[in-house]
Image (spheres, grey):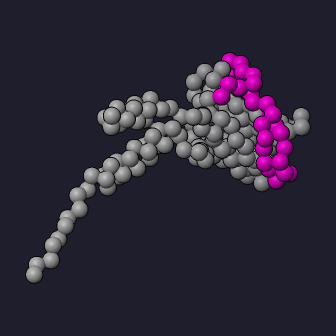
């Protein structure tokens, strides 16, 4: 019976996969601090719109010096000069050109973590540094739970099987 339980725990740990896609924090620090902005996207999520040279995400919650808002964010491929643009309330908030920050096709982009230096895309806008970081999940993944349960089970089994040494006093 204990072997079947151990086999079941091992099988659940092997077949476990992430419960959700990892969110990514995008932090754009512009040379002009009024154009700095932060937002979060789920990696490998389908964009709202895509074309041969761009991916667009609508209704993205952002945080900037102006406060919190909702924005439309477009990322461009290298052949379209890379970079990204951000529209808040139909006004162009940031416009940059630089490296392509996602791989794969434009229908399901996968963003690469790291720091990217971007230049101004239009007069009146500044470049800066875009940093993409993975955000740690608050809830452990199923594989983590399986490993934890297996570890506690092994400790409990070892404690139960330990023999008590009995020392008799000599008279």
Residue 136 spot, x, y in % from top left: 58, 46
Tell me if residue 167 comes above or below residue 15 in the rendering: below
**62 is within the stretch colored magenta:** yes
Horizontal arrangement in the rendering, residue 97 relative to residue 72 (left or right): left
Residue 165 visible in the displayed image: yes
Residue 65 spot, x, y in % from top left: 82, 53
Split into 4 quadrants, where in the image is the C terminus?
bottom left
Question: Which residue is situated farthest in the front direction here?
Answer: 171
Tell me if residue 30 comes above or below residue 112 in the rendering: below
Quadrant of the image occupied by residue 163? bottom left
Question: Which residue is situated farthest in the left direction here?
Answer: 171
Q: Residue placed at 73% from the left, 38% from the top?
A: 96
Residue 94 spot, x, y in % from top left: 79, 41
Tell me if residue 50 comes above or below residue 160 in the rendering: above
Q: Main secondary structure of the magenta part?
A: strand
Q: Residue placed at 71% from the left, 26% from the top?
A: 47
Residue 36 spot, x, y in % from top left: 76, 49
The residues colored magenta run 45-72
């Amino acid at each position: 019976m204990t072997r079947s339980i151990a086999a079941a725990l091992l099988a659940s740990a092997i077949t476990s996969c992430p419960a959700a896609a990892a969110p990514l924090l995008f932090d754009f620090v512009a040379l002009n601090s009024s154009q700095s902005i932060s937002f979060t996207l789920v990696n490998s999520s389908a964009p709202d719109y895509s074309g041969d040279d761009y991916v667009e995400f609508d209704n993205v919650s952002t945080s900037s010096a102006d406060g919190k808002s909702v924005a439309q964010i477009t990322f461009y491929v290298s052949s379209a000069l890379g970079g990204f643009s951000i529209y808040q309330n139909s006004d162009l908030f940031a416009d940059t050109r630089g490296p392509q920050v996602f791989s794969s096709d434009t229908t399901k982009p996968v963003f690469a973590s790291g720091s990217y230096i971007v230049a101004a895309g239009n007069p009146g806008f500044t470049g800066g540094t875009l940093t993409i970081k993975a955000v740690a999940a608050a809830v452990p993944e199923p594989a983590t739970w399986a490993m934890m349960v297996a570890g506690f089970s092994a400790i409990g089994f070892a404690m139960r099987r330990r023999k008590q040494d009995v020392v008799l006093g000599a008279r």
